[in-house]
Image (tube, helix red, strand yellow):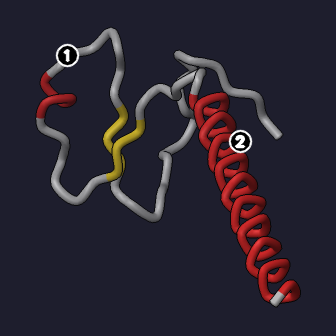
Amino acid sequence: MPAFRVGDVADADVVTPVPLVVLEPAGSSAPREVPAPGSALIARFNLGAAAEAEGAFVTAVSNLRGNFFAALAQLREKLAVGESQ
């Protein structure tokens, strides 16, 4: 598999299944303001995106776990009250 670097020039035409607009940070800001209609937008990636996603996932799982154990405790209380009657 070839390794590509920023600034490499394609030896052949690039063919994609969807239209693309590739933004160049050093280039004009005009394409950023008005992307081509119906085209996909490719931008530099966010280095912190994986950490943000992981943090959101851990928080969601932690909340679900807390909710589960709270519901389990309520069920145990209901069952304990039912057995004592």
Mark 2, mark 1: which one is toward the viewer? 2
Q: Position of residue 46 (x, y in %)?
A: 52, 25
Viewer-proximal residue among 28 and 53 = 53
Q: Quadrant of the N terminus?
A: top right
- SS at badge 1: loop
Q: Amino acid at mark 1?
A: Ser
Is 78 drawn above or below residue 33 in the view shown?
below
Q: Position of residue 16 (x, y in %)?
A: 47, 57
Q: Which residue is mark 1?
A: 28
The CA span between labels 2 and 1 is 40 Å
Q: Amino acid at mark 2?
A: Val
Residue shown at the point (39%, 61%) measured from the top left:
18
- Residue 6: mark: none
Q: Position of residue 74 (x, y in %)?
A: 71, 69
Is 35 drawn above or below residue 9 in the view shown?
below
Q: Residues within 10 Å of mark 2 (few under 14, many from 20)?
A: few
Residue shown at the point (35%, 20%) measured from the top left:
24
Between disc 2 and disc 1, whose residue precedes?
1
Residue furthest to the top in view is: 26
- Choose top left, top right, bottom left or bottom right for residue 43: top left
Viewer-proximal residue among 47 and 54 = 54
Q: Which residue is mark 2?
A: 58
- Choose top left, top right, bottom left or bottom right for residue 65: bottom right
Q: Position of residue 73 (x, y in %)?
A: 78, 64
Q: Quadrant of the C terminus?
A: bottom right
In the image, 55: left or right of 20?
right
- SS at badge 2: helix
Q: Residues within 10 Å of mark 1 (few under 14, many from 20)?
A: few
In the image, 8: left or right of 35?
right
